[in-house]
Image (cartoon, grey):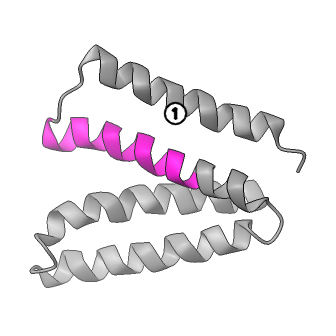
Amino acid sequence: MKWVFLVIAGLLEVAWAIGLKYTHGFTKLGPSILTVMGMIASFYFLSLALRSLPLGTAYAIWTGIGAVGTVILGIVLFREPADLIRLICIGFILIGIIGLKISSAH
């Protein structure tokens, strides 16, 4: 379950990061409430994963999921650039996430 908790935490990180865009600097109440709830939920699931995963591994994977997901949704939702070098760099992050998972003794 620790890996499931970590993936959930990472996906929730994507949700609240995207939510930040919709809060318009926390001036819109609905998106602001949902974003803060996403933050709390993301930290909660990360804390559950940290009960049995090494801090460095869990944190790197959590932020990696967040970074990759946020870039992908930024491209899809906000028409951010999807140039080759950017996609290659996201690929490196994915390789790092996979490498950390594979090399984890847990």
The quarter holding residue 77 reads top left
**Which residue in the rendered view is the most extreme toward the front?**
56
Q: Which residue is mark 1?
A: 93
Q: Is residue 91 left or right of residue 52?
A: left
The quarter holding residue 52 reads bottom right
**Which residue in the rendered view is the most extreme toward the top?**
84
Q: Is residue 34 left or right of residue 53?
A: left
Is residue 77 depicted above or below 63 in this figure? Answer: above
Quadrant the N terminus occupies: bottom right
Q: Is residue 36 left or right of residue 12?
A: left
Residue numbers of the magenta segment: 62-79
Residue 11 at what x, y percent from top left?
49, 55
Q: Residue at x 35, y 65 (%)?
A: 16
Residue 9: in magenta span: no
Q: Residue at x 32, y 40 (%)?
A: 71
Q: Amino acid at mark 1?
A: Ile
Q: Predominant secondary structure in magenta?
A: helix
Looking at the rendered structure, the secondary structure element under dot 1 is helix
Judge the density around disc 1: few (<14), some (14-19), many (≥20) Cα neighbours within 10 Å: some
Residue 50 at what x, y percent from top left?
73, 68
Is residue 101 depicted above or below 60 in this figure? Answer: above
Q: Residue at x 71, y 51 (%)?
A: 57
Residue 15 at what x, y percent from top left?
37, 60
